[in-house]
Amino acid sequence: MAQTIKNQIIEGNIPRHIAIIMDGNGRWAKEKGMNRIFGHSQGVETVRKIVEASSEIGVGYLTLYAFSTENWARPKKEVNALMELLVSTLKVEITKLHKNNVKLHTIGDIAALPEKCQQELEESKKQTENNTGLNLTLALSYSSKKDILNAAKILAHKSVNGDILIDDIDESVFQQELSTCNFPDVELLIRTSGENRISNFLLWELAYAELYFTKTHWPDFDAEGLYQAIDDYQKRERRF
Ligand code: FPP
């Protein structure tokens, strides 16, 4: 089945930029009588599968919502575990990512992360900076509203300093000030675990995206789930 749907979708239009809200690690763990942190570590396995599958079928950009600014409100123990998981995953996976020509990026308030995370991310980005395959972006301590506000402030400063005319501010000028300025707009957004919300993720960049919601919890999501989402995307008529 997986092979068939994979063969079918690669004949069609593969979305250039896929963004994913990886939701449901906690509920998945609870259903199994385990703690939430176990859910997150299983979530990492799904990240691995989805990055590999995306790279294989020629997705250009994959942006993963790994930690929102709202996630800081979670219990300290869970936040620490997520940060440690990020560091240990990068340590283990970066060589393989590099070998697969993946280029790592981040968006969000990286300075708010623990020093160890910042260091690991910096090294991983440096190691993969010349790669030309999948652009993998981790959104960490990310808030789309903050990103948009930041762009507005930069342009306000430029205007006050006489570096730009208000009438020259158009969509493309504005987009250049977003943290995603080097990426194309998202074409397909996937959210797992049954919530039909955007949750402050890539609000500007999702303007024309197809939205795909699945009830599957993130740790149960896999390559076939990704192919199904792409199949659904390919069947929709895209009207702007
Ligand atoms: C949502 O599940 C998931 C997160 C907030 C974190 C996602 C993190 C990972 C998959 C692991 C670390 C990532 C990388 C890239 C190494 P939830 O906790 O909100 O689940 P719930 O809604 O069921 O409680």
Image (tube, helix red, strand yellow):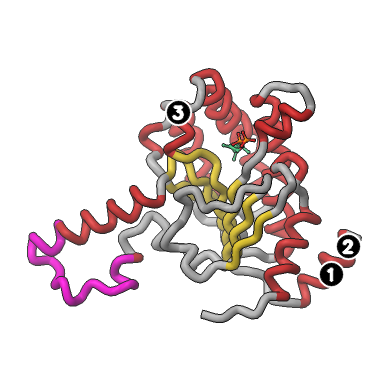
User: Tags 2 and 3 in contact by the CB under 8 Å rule?
Assistant: no
Give percent across and percent down for residue 89.
63, 34
Give percent across and percent down for residue 227.
76, 61
Q: Secondary structure at mark 1?
A: helix
Q: Which portion, as a residue range, is magenta? A: 157-174
Q: Residues within 10 Å of mark 3 (few under 14, many from 20)?
A: few
Q: Which residue: 60% across, 78% down?
A: 238
Image quadrant occupied by the N terminus:
bottom right
Residue 1 can be seen in this image: yes
Separation of marks 2 and 3 at Cα, in angstroms: 41 Å
Q: Quadrant of residue 142?
A: top left
Residue placed under numbered mark 1 in the picture: 7
Q: Residues within 10 Å of mark 2 (few under 14, many from 20)?
A: few
Give percent across and percent down for residue 105.
49, 50
Q: Which callout, 2 or 3, points at the residue further toward the start of the chain?
A: 2
Q: Is residue 239 one of those drawn in magenta?
A: no
Q: Secondary structure at mark 2?
A: helix
User: Tags 2 and 1 in contact by the CB under 8 Å rule?
Assistant: yes
Amino acid on which disc 2 is placed = Gln
Q: Which residue: 69% across, 43% down?
A: 218
Amino acid on which disc 1 is placed = Asn
Residue placed under numbered mark 3 in the picture: 73
Q: Residue furthest top?
A: 77
Separation of marks 3 and 1 at Cα, in angstroms: 43 Å
